[in-house]
Amino acid sequence: MRRREGRHIVDDETWEIIGPAKSERFTKSMVEVWRQVNKCNLFTPSEEKTLHRLSMFLQLNTNALVTPNGEYMTIERMADETGIDRSNIRKYVKELMRKNALGKWSSNGREIFYINPFLYQSGDVKPYLFNLFDEEYHERCKTEHLSRFKAGKKQTSLIAAQ
């Protein structure tokens, strides 16, 4: 019989190392921010459910939304992978982008969706992603009267409800 011992799979009888154990991937939920988000009802229950389901598809260290095969997600793939109806997911993604919880930027002719790292993080998310969401907030402030969502004393790049 085989079993996991730390970072290795070992044989129960001989204690011989059979091979490396596959590590679990995980996503960090930023608890302090989420407490304030829930307290202030920043997201509707449907938006929150969508964010939670999408957080399971974060690419390590980038927070980009990718399929299990590593391809960047489109709206259609988001619907397929999360089980949320396409028309509804379009509506939720649009609203989440309005609140700066999701971002969409182009790279090499592809549209790539990201989750704001103030909500979820996968791996070691680099500062450039925080800056992308911050720049998006400042760009929109030029044309709209917006306010940042504050999680306690922490300023986020999320946009507070108007």
Image (cartoon, rainbow, N blue to C red):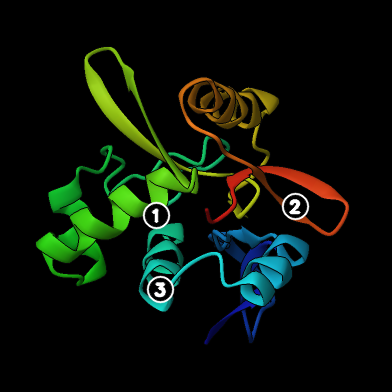
Q: At 48% across and 48% down in the image, what residue appears?
A: 99
User: Mark 2 or mark 3: which comes first in sequence?
Assistant: 3
Q: Nearer the viewer, residue 1 or 140?
A: 140
Callout 2–callout 3 Cβ contact below 8 Å: no
Mark 3, residue position? 49
From the viewer's perspective, tell me whether residue 68 is left or right of residue 29.
left
**Residue type pointed to by label 2:** Lys
The answer to whether residue 68 is seen in the rendering is no
**Which numbered disc, 3 or 1, marks the residue that appears first in the sequence?**
3
Residue 138 position, x and y percent, is: 59, 24
Give the residue at the far right of this rendering: 153
Give the label on residue 128, or none: none
Sequence-earlier tag: 2 or 1: 1
- Which numbered circle lies on residue 57? 1
Neighbor class of circle 2 (other Cα within 10 Å; few <14, some 14-19, many 20+) is: some
Front: mark 2 or 3: 2
Camera-near label (2 vs 1) is 2
Calculate the distance from the C-alpha at mark 2 to the C-alpha at mark 1.
Answer: 26 Å
Between 24 and 99, which is closer to the camera in this rendering?
A: 99
Please say if 31 is above or below 133.
below
Q: Residue at x 22, y 14 (%)?
A: 109
Which residue occupies 65% across, 71% down? 40
Q: Is residue 119 above or below residue 138?
A: below
Q: Amino acid at mark 3?
A: Lys
- The correct choice, above or below, for 115 with respect to 135 in the image is below
> Is residue 127 found left or right of 99 in the rendered image?
right
- Rendered image: mark on residue 150: 2
Q: Nearer the viewer, residue 59 or 43?
A: 43
